[in-house]
Amino acid sequence: MEEKDFIVVGGGVSGLLSALALGKEGRDVLLLEKEDYLGGVCRSYKVDGYQVDTGPHMITRVAQGPLKYLIDNYFDIIPNFMPHGRYYVVLNNRVKPFPWNMRDWVSFDLLPQTDRIYLMKTLFSISYLFNKGEDLSKKSVADFIGNGLSEPTIRFLNCMSYFMTGSPMDKTPVERFVDAEHYKSQSRGMLDKIYNILMKEGAQDQVYPKGGIQSIITSIKASIPEKKVEIRTGEKVVGINHAEKTIESSSGEYRYNTLIYSGFASDLPKLTENKLPKNYMESLSRLYKINALTIWLGLDEKIFNRDGSEIWVDSNSYTWAVPVSNYDPNLSPRGKQLVGFAFSLPQGFNEKKEKKRSLETIYEMNPRIERNVDMIHHQMLIPEKAVWTIDTLFANVKTPIDSIYLVGTDTERRSMGITRASYSVNTLLSTLKKDERL
């Protein structure tokens, strides 16, 4: 039976980053991926002359965040990042940049002045509670706003909750909007410091990789030491015997010293031949997934000309519109534009109806789009392995099972997407070092 120091199950971005880091640390690693491609929901592919990503992506905290640490320590090839620009809010048939500072918030007249004043008072209350060290993870956005706000303001807050977590504001923890790292950092003044705990993540330091999101995966693969890391695609893991420290795949059996599982943590009990602790299985059942729809449109002419992306509060379904070819014209044929439109989907959705409704929403918001459609492509995705709600209990990278560790976006609540995955990988690495496995 083949034996490896580390076996990584899953070749999404979390699994690949883990394999890269472990290999660069001198460990022998085998990575098994059930699909015939790598990257999971972090990859790109061609459609009718356009290159689409698996959903729109923007990467946060590249200057000093978790991905920056991994790039500095383990990457040989560094992606070329392009600044995201601004977020534009479309509300009441008007467009304004999202207010990332106090001055802009005062003039953000898409919302009534009385609502803005009320929200500022609420922000001070949140700041006070946060500064006292109170746990806000079980307090929802709706818990703090009361019942006196206007309908546009309620829609705005609900839209931002979906944008940040994929859940409505009565399920979104207010803590998701609190950025402890920025709150503790230096700021120009107390008002700005208080304001910066709210939604700071999108204000700056967001980028899009030139060449599409696939360029991240390409950089990881090019940096992996081939003599230390073996990657096998098209090989599905079907069983884990943690008593014997062996796994069974569709192609054979392997023995491991340490197993890194980067699939859905909630699926781990289905793979283990030996029973897991009951309380641990119950905690894994509190990892909730959301479904998302992305509609990619190739347009005959450039319709989106702003320096960033748009958040449509007015639309029938809250929408994030990202013109990715503005960051890299090579993603679309010459003279055309590629735009991704992301929608959160309700529980029990009908796929055919949601695709139809969402496309109609796009056309209603801007009829010019319908007249210039060159390509339509749909994606049904699970963007995060666990959504952060007031009821979510995230898994820990260290399981109660000897020698088995988890990694991925269901082990980390900070941020989203690749940044969230990077936080998880860094936590995994520090845990392995603490356990003297690395």
Image (cartoon, rainbow, N blue to C red):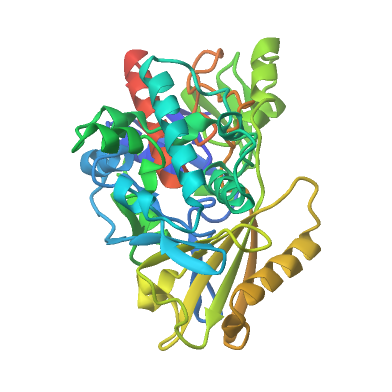
Q: Name the residue nearer the viewer: 196 or 260.
A: 196
Q: Position of residue 75 (x, y in %)?
A: 26, 46
Q: Name the residue nearer the viewer: 96 or 23.
A: 96
Q: Name the residue nearer the viewer: 292 or 155.
A: 155
Q: Name the residue nearer the viewer: 66 or 188.
A: 188
How many dots with numbers?
0
Q: Residue at x 35, y 72 (%)?
A: 328
Residue 248 visible in the snapshot: yes
Q: Residue at x 65, y 39 (%)?
A: 289
**Which image quadrant: the N terminus?**
top right
Q: Residue at x 57, y 75 (%)?
A: 297
Residue 224 visible in the snapshot: no
Could you say which quadrant of the image residue 309 lies in?
A: bottom left
Q: Is residue 24 above or below residue 301?
A: above
Q: Position of residue 393 (x, y in %)?
A: 59, 23
Q: Position of residue 2 (x, y in %)?
A: 50, 31
Q: Is residue 37 left or right of residue 347?
A: left
Q: Residue at x 44, y 27 (%)?
A: 126
Q: Is residue 237 left or right of residue 426?
A: right
Q: Is residue 107 left or right of residue 263?
A: left
User: For the view shown, which residue lies furthest in the front direction?
Assistant: 114
**Which image quadrant: the C terminus?**
top left
Q: Is residue 151 left or right of residue 352?
A: left
Q: Is residue 431 above or below residue 232?
A: above
Q: Position of residue 174 (x, y in %)?
A: 51, 31
